[in-house]
Structure formats: structure tokens, C-alpha cells
Amino acid sequence: MNQRTTAPTTLWIAAGLLLGLASVSAPAASLNPLSGEILGQVKNASGVAQMGATVFLYNRYDELVRKGLSNEQGRFVFDALAPDLYSIRVILASFVPAERRNIAVLPSSENRLDINLTGVFSSIGVTSTGMPPFDRTASTYRFKLALYVVNGPAPSDFSF
């Protein structure tokens, strides 16, 4: 075999292997332990799943972060969210809009919303899993400290 033809072939094989490894590791990169998620199901007052409800996700400043639609089972997911406070607003024709404010997304947390749309009063119930907000573990303090590094100096009452 000629040395001139093996070098380009070796480069193509190496490039293919790198692309293959990148595609295999890409899903693992989306599982960021510092992010959380908000997921839920939209139902009517009788408990029937509602497809096509528009779900809006807002940050703490009431700026739209994402928008989605509920699927055939009435489910929606907002994943890979930075730790912060969020609000959800759900709109579907023939129903009163439902809104829930101050949903705390923590690192590795999962916030499940049970959304019940009605003609008069709609409601959203929240069930959070993951690290509780007042957990006194080292990871809680690392997270708090990281927020102060990004947002400015820690307040004088900050304690470990």
C-alpha cells in the first residue's frame, strides 16, 4: 500500500471516530446536574388530558423563556433549566387560563405540575423532587456561593 493513500484514509477514519464519540456523548452532556426541569400534565375538571394547550415559561423578570404545547396525553416538559424562579401560564380555548408563579428550580430538581383547567377556576398544583430548598448540604452552599459570584458579593448574613 502506498503511504500517500493511507494518510488521508487514516484521517477520515479518525474524524469518523471522533464524530461517532461526540454523538454518543451528546445526550450525556444534556444531563447537567446543575440544571432542573419543570414538567406537567394539563387536564380538564373531569380529569381528561388536554392536547394542544399552550404552555408559557417565564423567568423571575416575567420575560418569556420558552413556549410549548401539551401532547396527546396533555404532557409538556421544560428541561435543562438554570436554577432560578420561574412562572408557568397555560392557555387553551374554552378554559380560563391557569398561572403559577415562583416555581423554584434547583440543581437536579424535578417540578411536576398538575394543571386543572376549568371554565371558572383553574389551578396548578406543584410537586417538587430533588434537593429541598433548605437542605444544609455542601452542594447547597456551593450553589449559593456560585450565585453570589455571578450576581455580586455575598450579603453579610451569608453563612455556611
Image (cartoon, grey):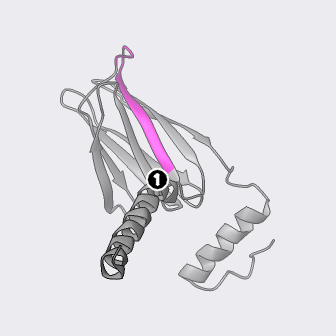
Image coordinates for residue 12, horizontal then vertical, percent: 34, 70
Q: Residue at x 36, y 13 (%)?
A: 46
Estimate how packed mark 1 is, as few (under 14), some (14 to 19) or many (20 or more) residues with alpha carbons within 10 Å. few
Q: Is residue 19 left or right of residue 50?
A: right
**Secondary-structure class at tag 1:** helix
Q: Residue furthest top?
A: 46
Q: Is residue 133 left or right of residue 138?
A: left
Using the rendered view, name the quadrant where residue 34 is placed: bottom right
Q: Residue furthest bottom?
A: 153
Image coordinates for residue 77, horizontal then vertical, percent: 40, 42
Quarter of the picture holding the C terminus: bottom right
Nearer to us in this view, 8 or 111:
8
Per the rendered image, the range of residues in magenta is 37-48
Q: Is residue 57 above or below residue 121?
A: below
Disc 1 designates what residue?
A: 27
Q: Residue at x 67, y 81 (%)?
A: 154
Q: Residue at x 43, y 66 (%)?
A: 18
Q: Main secondary structure of the magenta part?
A: strand
Quarter of the picture holding the N terminus: bottom left
Image coordinates for residue 81, horizontal then vertical, percent: 46, 57
